[in-house]
Amino acid sequence: MGDELVGFGYGFTGAYGQWWTDRVARSLTQEQKREWLEPPHFEVVELHVRPSFQGAGVGSLLLAQLLTRQPHDRALLTTQLGSRQARGFYAKNGWLELCPVDFGAGFAPYLVLGKRL
């Protein structure tokens, strides 16, 4: 790999009043909201690995580092409902599929995933 950038990821603390959190909240049950959104939570916003490095463990390493460098005990993210590759990746890394979410016109169908840390 050397000095070549092969992937990146980032996230932040999620809270009500933020666009993503408010839309996800509409799709969760009351119990899920209490468990996943009401305590401070971490939102994985982006995780990308160059295609030529996918399947080599880079994404799992990036995700693990991202999750260990934040203070919360739960994390959430969304991925496209139709992406079997992404859904398989997150399942392999211990994420639970919580529910579908509709972000509105112009957005593909998405799925909310959560992980206890």
Image (cartoon, rainbow, N blue to C red):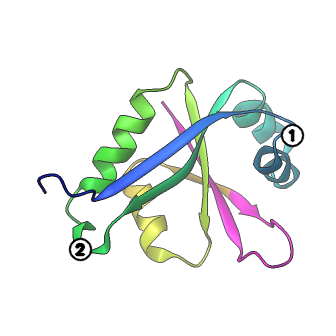
In the rendered image, residue 105 lying in the magenta stretch gets the answer yes
> Which residue in the structure is indicated by mark 1?
30
What distance separates the C-alpha of mark 1 from that of mark 2? 41 Å
Q: Is residue 66 left or right of residue 114?
A: left
Circle 2 Cα neighbour tier, 10 Å, few/some/many (<14 / 14–19 / ≥20) = few
Q: Residue at x 27, y 56 (%)?
A: 5
**Outermost residue, front direction?**
3
Q: Residue at x 81, y 67 (%)?
A: 102
Q: Residue at x 46, y 55 (%)?
A: 47
Name above or below for residue 25 compared with residue 89: above
Q: Position of residue 104 (x, y in %)?
A: 86, 70
Q: Any mark on residue 52, and which?
A: 2
Pointer 1 and pointer 2: residues touching (CB < 8 Å)? no
The residue segment tinted magenta is 99-117
Q: Is residue 60 left or right of residue 35?
A: left
Report the front residue among 15 and 112. 15
Report the front residue among 20 and 99. 20
Q: Position of residue 65 (x, y in %)?
A: 35, 36
Q: Position of residue 48 (x, y in %)?
A: 42, 60
Report the front residue among 115 and 60. 60
Circle 1 Cα neighbour tier, 10 Å, few/some/many (<14 / 14–19 / ≥20) = few
In the rendered image, residue 18 lying in the magenta stretch gets the answer no
Q: Is residue 79 left or right of residue 62?
A: right
The amino acid at mark 2 is Ser
Name above or below for residue 12 compared with residue 3: above
Q: Quadrant of the N terminus?
A: bottom left
Name above or below for residue 45 compared with residue 73: below
